[in-house]
Image (cartoon, rainbow, N blue to C red):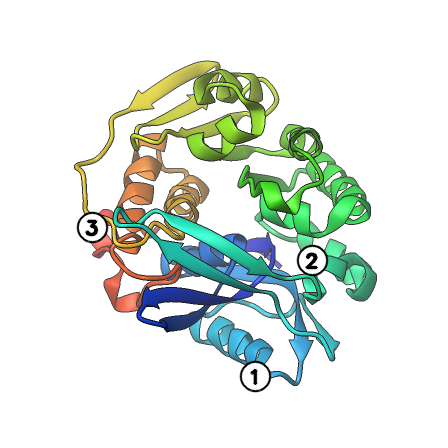
Amino acid sequence: MGGVVGFGEVMVEVSLTGSGSAVIGYAGDVFNTAVYLRRLGTQVSLATALGDGDPFSTAILGLMAAEGIGAELVTRAPGRLPGLYTIQRDAQGERSFFFWREQAPFRQFFDIADVSAFTTALRGADLVYVSGIPLAVIGEAGRAKLLAILADLAAAGVKIAFDSNYRPSLWPSRDAALAAMEAVIPYCRLVSASGQDVEALTLRPLDDVAADWARLCPEVVARAEDRTVTVYLDGKAHRLPAPPPIQAIDTTGAGDSFNAGYISAWLKGEPFERGVAAGHAVAARVVQHVGAIIPAAAMPPPGQRPSQR
């Protein structure tokens, strides 16, 4: 199969703009990263579950086609609708989320998908990408099945990358979330962790947690709230300064787009400094637009992207 396979949910995004109005889009953390990876020149497919016959699922598939994201691993569920979430932003562009996803078909992915075909496709990927959000959404039984698949993939030499996105409302408890994520990390080649998520999840400083995770995974990218980034690699911590400040309009998708820039460089064998710079360049554009997916024309110029080789 080749390229990157992302495993995650795509939802209807309702971005509140005030005065009773809103902007409709389609997003999800793994999907957001997949879109930006594809725009940066990486072959990407998405494994997910959508409805069948409803306008929202049709629009998501249309967006995937327009962005060049492979849909061969999309499972359709007649009579079901994708999840929905709204975004409310404060004056600094920081956002709050509200979700409606109880009947979303992705929750039952392992019950309705062709798991054999899914597993076979992952074995042929250059990288499998997953995050803490789909781990939460698929539930305990789904996590057990996914963990077994990831263990087999890692043993076969398939690269796995993980983002520790943490949404407390999706988990039965903080301890359950931490245990689930730390069960995945040993199978990964790359882990991306934001300070906001990690400190809420572990009640410990980001640097301490990232150093611990770096004993389980070869490369950990720790993204602090002040936008400094520390890359834990080869037993060393490499701290990179924050880029120049920018005025954010909407921080939705900032971490997801940073991950795309970093992973794009990482897959090409670029040094981590180049990956961090590329991640910051994409995220800086994303936070200056409303919603998780910005217009393709707003992407950073080629000189600020990972080199095409």
> Of marks 3 and 1, which one's residue comes earlier in the chain?
1
- Left/right of residue 53 with respect to residue 203 in the rendered view: right
Determine whether label 2 and label 3 are within 8 Å by CB.
no
How far across and how far down the image is residue 86, in percent?
47, 62
The amino acid marked with disc number 3 is Gly
How far across and how far down the image is residue 228, in percent?
30, 28
Q: Give the crowd class for mark 2: few <14, some 14-19, many >=20 residues within 10 Å.
A: some
Q: Tell me: residue 14, above or below residue 303.
A: below
Per the rendering, the mark at residue 55 is 1
- Quadrant where the image shows the N terminus: bottom right
Name the residue rendered at 25%, 26% in the picture. 241
How far across and how far down the image is residue 303, in percent?
20, 50
Q: Give the crowd class for mark 1: few <14, some 14-19, many >=20 residues within 10 Å.
A: few
Per the rendering, the mark at residue 303 is 3
Determine the CA span between mark 2 and mark 1: 28 Å
> Of marks 2 and 1, which one's residue comes earlier in the chain?
1
- Give the quarter of the image for residue 255: top left
Determine the CA span between mark 3 and mark 1: 38 Å
Q: Give the crowd class for mark 3: few <14, some 14-19, many >=20 residues within 10 Å.
A: few
Name the residue rendered at 29%, 30% in the picture. 226
How far across and how far down the image is residue 256, in percent?
43, 48
Is 301 or 256 nearer to us in this picture?
Answer: 256
